[in-house]
Image (cartoon, rainbow, N blue to C red):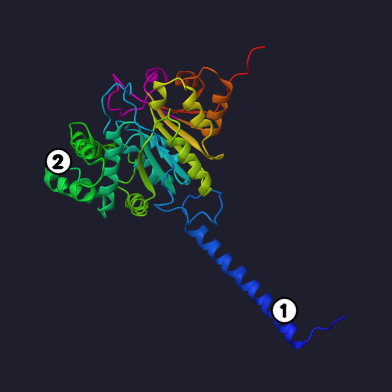
Amino acid sequence: MRKKGPSMVVLHKNKKNLFLTALFICSVFYLIDCSTGQGQGDHSVFGRKASLTREGLQLSAIDTPPADRHLHAEHYPSSNERRLDLFKSRVVGLGGGYMGVGTDQNLTLIAWARSEFAYLFDFDPVTVSINRLHLHFIEISPTYPEYEKLWDPKNKNDVLSIIEKRFSNDPEYQVILKSYQIALRKGAVPQRLGDLHKISKVYPEFTSFHNDTKDYDYLRNLVLDGKIIAIDGNLLGDKTINSISEKAKELEIPIRILYTSNAEEYFRYPEGMRKNFLNLYGDSKSIVIRTVTKGAKVYGFPDGEMFPVAFPFHYNIQSLDNLKTWLTKENVLYTTILLRNRKPIEKGFSLIEALPPEPKK
């Protein structure tokens, strides 16, 4: 048997030291990642950050906007859901990925959740363009007041120059210009941003990117890093939602929030929509955030609604896993069936935790 000489002992010690050094470095990086991540989920630390970039978040395919959207109004340039604060305690710090329809309400939810990336999708090109404007205005505005000034109609001429500078070579430039004009209409974006301040005065617990610098800074950093993307998408389509789900799986970051506004009540979960929701890459913390107008007066609506007589909203949250169970077991499903099984939490807000009934034998 060959004995270990001095050189072999030194070599053995060097290998051991190298191993311990490598282990120490990996541990330090792991601890740094854990300590700096805000609301991040229980997903892989190593291997995901290289792809969590502006380029890495680009999707493989997106839906083409439909010719007829069957909506009550031609466009929805801003949200009229005033009581988003009802969602806050169940959204704060969820982390993970975010996907949602509509416009400015997404910004509030993303900031609360401290989402790691977000896709704002809609089947109305005007909505998508308004979201692109929101993101660009945030990008060039270090503070919220500066951002809000860009939506002030008094600054229209200056803002048009900003839009031209940023988007003049964009294929959607004309749509973006049209969308900006729509966004400035009465009751649209400037009024909504003003309403946020008014809502906070009545409901002090409603703090968001408009009056919380930490929320605004978090949003802006996501935008600067290219981690919030506005794209065409359709709840019934076969491309955008699937592409988002594939991207989340590739990043090993589950979609923690699917925000649908009141879009679900327009449909009875047709096949394409079912597939999209059933295939969505989430985890046990993933939730669906929705509002409904159909039946809101029966379910209850909160104080402070914009249209309490004509179109009040009921606010609802359901776990993604629970919704998937309903979609799997119920051939016919629509929001009214789901909301019959709601658990009231407070005035105008409920959860869906009940499972679908067992089929009759």
| Above or below 236: residue 57 | below
For residue 12, which numbered disc appears in the image?
1
**Residue bounds of the magenta highlight:** 293-316
**In this rendering, would 345 be left or right of 357?**
left
Residue highlighted by disc 2: 153
Q: Amino acid at mark 1?
A: His
Name which residue lies at 65% across and 72% down.
Answer: 19
**Residue 222 on the magenta span:** no
- SS label for mark 1: helix
The picture places residue 176, in percent across and down from the top left corner, at 23, 39
The picture places residue 43, in percent across and down from the top left corner, at 56, 50
- SS label for mark 2: helix
Q: Amino acid at mark 2?
A: Pro
**In this rendering, would 157 be left or right of 225?**
left
**Residue 299 on the magenta span:** yes
The picture places residue 169, in percent across and down from the top left corner, at 23, 47
Q: Is any part of residue 205 visible from this angle? A: no
Which of marks 2 and 1 precedes in the sequence? Answer: 1
Q: CA distance from mark 1 to mark 2?
A: 73 Å
Name which residue lies at 52% across and 21% down.
Answer: 341
130 and 250: which is toward the camera? 250
Kindly indicate the quadrant of the structure image that contains residue 153. top left
Q: Residues within 10 Å of mark 1 (few under 14, many from 20)?
A: few
**In this rendering, would 183 be left or right of 282?**
left
Total numbered circles:
2
Locate the C terminus by quadrant: top right
Task: Pick out the residue farthest to the top.
Answer: 361
